[in-house]
Image: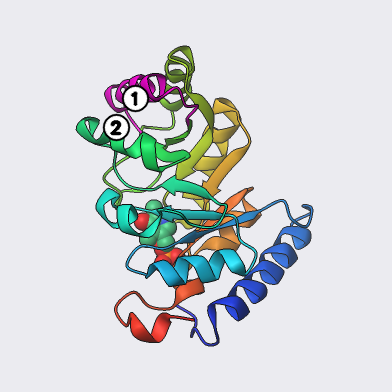
């Protein structure tokens, strides 16, 4: 993990520039990869600092944590990054704009129902499992059929999310995620975190999810604030 120095605003500016450089070097356009600020274990002020620095997307893994942090944030798109439990679907729909990580039909059906009841459109990504170290995710082979079913239920399936392997062949994993995205369709391939985002951009990621790289280590909370 690279040493993280400077304020949130400085780190966002540096990362924005580096993401664009890697995209351009890979033959892609500047601005074709968005940066999602993963605010888990960070304060509400840290989330606001990331938005003030020009980011538009924020993400949380735990509903409880987002409840306190994401109310009345500046204009932003809020992504749920955690595992969807059916009995939490209603609360997830009321707090988040995008659910990254629908990996099975029953969770998708619960979200679709909650979105209908709320009269609110819901964007979702299909989570694809490309790593033996990852517990969740549909197999790449099952992802297109799952996406089709979720679309039948009225969900706006906008692409694929995947988590890279902790060790092993990251390139092979990211290539598999990209192939699944090509079959699922949509406009978002959410791939890459602080430790592996450069590879993800080379494999076609359109959204990198960065926590540590923006906010610093999650264990030293005070020092990681802007
Ligand atoms: C925590 C988390 C991230 C960010 O991880 P960093 O390594 O801190 O960038 C990205 N995606 C998901 C799903 C996460 O849970």
Kindly indicate whether the residue at mark 1 contacts the one at mark 2 (C-beta within 8 angstroms): yes
Q: Quadrant of residue 15?
A: bottom right
| Residue 114 covered by magenta stretch | yes
| Residue 34 x %, y % | 63, 54
Q: Determine crowd level at label 1: few under 14, some 14-19, many 20+ residues with C-alpha closer than 10 A.
A: many
Question: Is residue 104 positioned above or below 130 on the image?
Answer: above
User: Which image quarter is the N terminus in?
Assistant: bottom left
| Residue at image location 32% in from the left, 22% down from the top | 105
The disc placed on residue 155 is none
| Residue at image location 40% in from the left, 19% down from the top | 116
Q: Determine crowd level at label 2: few under 14, some 14-19, many 20+ residues with C-alpha closer than 10 A.
A: some
| Residue at image location 23% in from the left, 30% down from the top | 86
Q: Which residue is mark 1?
A: 114
What's drawn in magenta, residue-wise?
A: 103-122
**What secondary structure is found at the residue carrying circle 1?**
helix
Q: Which residue is mark 2?
A: 89
| Residue 126 covered by magenta stretch | no
Label 1 CB less than 8 angstroms from ligand 1: no
| Residue 96 x %, y % | 42, 42
| Distance CA(mark 2)–CA(mark 1) | 6 Å
Main SS class of the magenta portion in the image: helix
| Residue at image location 51% in from the left, 27% down from the top | 157
| Residue 53 x %, y % | 62, 70
109 relative position to 14: left or right: left
Instruction: Judge by depth and name the residue closer to the eye, 45 or 89.
Output: 45
């Amino acid at each position: 993990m690279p040493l993280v120095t400077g304020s949130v605003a400085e780190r966002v500016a540096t990362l924005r520039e580096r993401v664009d450089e890697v995209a351009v070097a890979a033959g892609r356009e500047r601005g074709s990869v968005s940066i999602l600020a993963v605010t888990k274990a960070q304060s509400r002020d840290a989330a606001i600092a990331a938005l003030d620095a020009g980011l538009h997307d924020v993400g949380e893994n735990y509903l409880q944590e987002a409840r306190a942090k994401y109310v009345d944030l500046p204009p932003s798109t809020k992504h749920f990054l955690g595992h969807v439990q059916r009995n939490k679907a209603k609360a997830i729909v009321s707090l988040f704009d995008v659910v990254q990580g629908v990996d099975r039909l029953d969770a998708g059906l619960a979200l679709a129902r909650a979105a209908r009841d709320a009269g609110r459109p819901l964007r979702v990504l299909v989570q694809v499992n490309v790593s033996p170290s990852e517990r969740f995710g549909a197999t790449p082979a099952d992802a297109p059929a799952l996406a089709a079913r979720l679309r039948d239920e009225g969900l706006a399936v906008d692409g694929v999310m995947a988590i890279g392997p902790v060790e092993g062949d990251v390139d092979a994993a990211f290539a598999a995620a990209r192939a699944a995205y090509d079959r699922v369709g949509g406009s978002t391939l959410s791939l890459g975190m602080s430790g592996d985002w450069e590879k993800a951009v080379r494999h076609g990621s359109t959204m990198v999810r960065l926590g540590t790289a923006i906010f610093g280590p999650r264990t030293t909370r005070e020092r990681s604030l802007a």
